[in-house]
Structure formats: C-alpha cells, structure tokens
Amino acid sequence: MLPLWSQIVTEKNIQGKWQLVNYITASANLDLQTGKATLDKTAYSFGQDTADKLKSDMESYTDMLKKATVEINGNNFTQEISDTLLVGVFTIENKDNHQVMKGKFDNGTNGTIRIALQDGKLVLTYAGQNKTYVYKKI
C-alpha cells in the first residue's frame, strides 16, 4: 500500500521536464528557491557548531543545484545535476510498499530509486543514501 499523500506514478504522468526545488538529507532540507536550509533536531545532536556548519554547507550547494533538472520522454530520462549527466531508460515497479524507478544508464550502471508524486511534485528518494530530490514541473 502506498502512502496516502502520494498518487500512483505512471510513465504517462511524469512526462516532461522537471526542475529541482528541494534537496533533502537525513537532517536538513535545502529550499532552492530561497537558498535557505532548515535543520531538524537530529542535526543539533552533535552541537550548535556542527549544525551551523551543516546549514552553511547545505546552503553553499544552492547555485549548483538550482539548475538541476530531470527530463522524461517515454521511458527515457535525463537527469542533470551540476556537471553530472545521467541518461538512461527506466521501468516503474512496486517494491516494499513503494514505487521504484529501475534505471539502466548509458554509462553501463543500473540503479533503483523510490519515486512518488506528492502535491504535483516528483519526489526521487535514494533511501540508502538518505537523500531526496523534489522536482516541480516546468
């Protein structure tokens, strides 16, 4: 069963170009429109100085990440983050109560990420890395 806040993802409803608007880690959320990072309480568990450094580091990624995009045409996708371009084909499957996108990339690698549509935004989560990328359609 999928979470109530998300809708079923199909190849058809994710077509087009999407721009990154939030970059989320285990303890921080970077809003790319404002350039401001918010930290959750776990970020402060190692002290204020460490939390301040994390916030500063996250905010320093703004210029690099605000240009990041994903473009989906059929079952082909192109993800561009900074100077990294990832091109491949994908399928959408159900796994462990989540939908996942399984990709085969042009660099010879394969990968699986959680995929969701939430409030009209495309949410890609790399669960093993505790990183989430939230995109809006452009």
Image (cartoon, grey):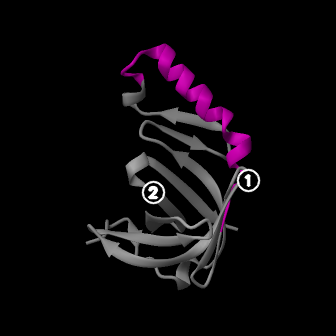
What label does residue 125 carry, if any? 2
Q: Secondary structure at mark 1?
A: loop
Amino acid carrying label 1: it is: Lys
* Residue 108 in view in this figure: yes
Amino acid carrying label 2: it is: Thr
The answer to whether 124 appears left or right of 6 in the picture is: right
Q: Quadrant of the N terminus?
A: bottom left
Q: Is residue 84 magenta?
A: no
Tell me whether circle 2 and circle 1 mark residues in contact (CB < 8 Å).
no
The kind of secondary structure the magenta stretch mainly shows is: helix
List x then y, in percent, for residue 129. Answer: 43, 47
List x then y, in percent, for residue 9. Answer: 45, 77
Q: Quadrant of the C terminus?
A: bottom right
Name the residue nearer the viewer: 126 or 20. Answer: 126
**Residue, x 46% and y 15% (percent of image)?**
48
Disc 1: which residue: 67
Magenta-drawn segment? 44-70
